[in-house]
Image (cartoon, rainbow, N blue to C red):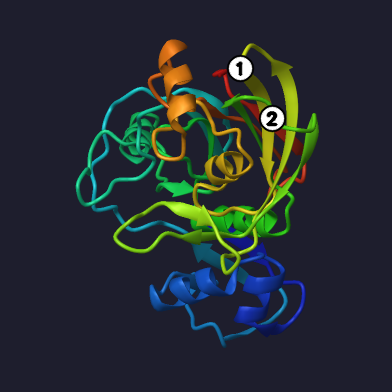
Amino acid sequence: MELKHIALREGRLSSFLKQELGLSTGLMNRLKWAQRLYVNGQSRHADHWVTPGDVITAVLDDDQPQYPAQDGPITVLYEDEHLLCVDKPAGMLVHPSRACCTGTLANYVLGYYEKTGQKSAFHPVTRLDRDTFGVVLLAKNSHVHGLLNQLHAEKALIKTYEALVFGKPGQPQGQIDAPIARLPLPSLLRQVHPEGKPARTLYWVTETYDGWSKVLLQPVTGRTHQLRVHCAYLGFPILGDPQYGTEQSLMLSQKLGLSSQALCARELSFPHPITGTPLQIQSKFHV
């Protein structure tokens, strides 16, 4: 993909890349070292002096990943030339790991791009645990990825999750404000700890049943396992969660036939990073 701009002023190429094209400093540096910055068709350094009428081009082609593209199940919820939103099922990794380099969402998305003739790399903006299901937002190039990450940092990307929890929260709605830290190695789990990083979650109870409830959750911060840790901390662990559940919640989960955690990334709301149009993407899954 190429970003083009015809200069209406004079100045260093770097200033056009940041202001007119909106490139992040990190992306600009990567393109500079890869010699993917051009003025009037000639490769130029970022300090090149640009004059009115010059055509600036930034080539955003991504390097080939170290994992294969695969034909697999992809449910597209929204797509345009900049974005792709898909529904990830439970049990699927988002990105390959050392132990598993096939059968992940990344493999299938690359396969989808190949099949549809798109030269895009895998740029996840939101990530889900293996057993969490629902909406995953992807950028189709590193520039849009940077813009979406900026929206995320500015709290303009709102994520709403749906979950089944053990018991019933004390209040019909509220905020969980409890810092989260990693458990001592070799554990990969997290815990609420006074020396942890700040973490906040909003919640609303939408339905109550005999011994369990359905809730909506909105993470204000984005700590690893935040929703699962926060719900467990307040005494209503997410049903089907083998890592943060209690003996009672796991017994109820088994009774209800839940084979994995009942946590769905239900909706993403954000302004389109290029057009500014408000978007609201909803998963086809429910808990």
Task: Answer above or below: position of 56 versus 49.
Answer: above
| Among the two numbered marks 2 and 1 on one chain, the one whose residue lies closer to the N terminus | 1
Q: Which mark is residue 31?
A: none
Taking the image as shown, residue 253 lies to the left or right of residue 208, namely left
Q: Is residue 129 above or below residue 76?
A: below
Which secondary structure, mark 2? strand
What residue type is disc 1 on?
Gly
Q: Nearer the viewer, residue 265 or 6?
A: 265
- Label 2: how many residues lie within 10 Å, few (<14), some (14-19) or many (20+)? many
Position of residue 175 measured from the top left corner of the image (x, y, whole percent) = 76, 45
* Residue receiving disc 1: 211
Q: Is residue 61 visible?
A: yes
Three-letter code for the amino acid on which mark 2 is drawn = Leu
Question: What's the residue at 48%, 47% (across, down)?
Answer: 124
- Residue pushed farthest left? 99
Residue at numbered disc 2: 216
Residue at left 73%, top 53%?
155
The residue depicted at 29 percent of the width and 54 percent of the height is: 64
Res 161 → quadrant: top right
Mark 1: secondary structure: loop
**Residue 152, percent across and down?**
66, 54
Picture quadrant of residue 51: bottom right
Q: Is residue 82 visible?
A: no
Q: Residue 199 at what x, y percent from top left?
A: 64, 56
Foreground: 89 or 218?
Answer: 218
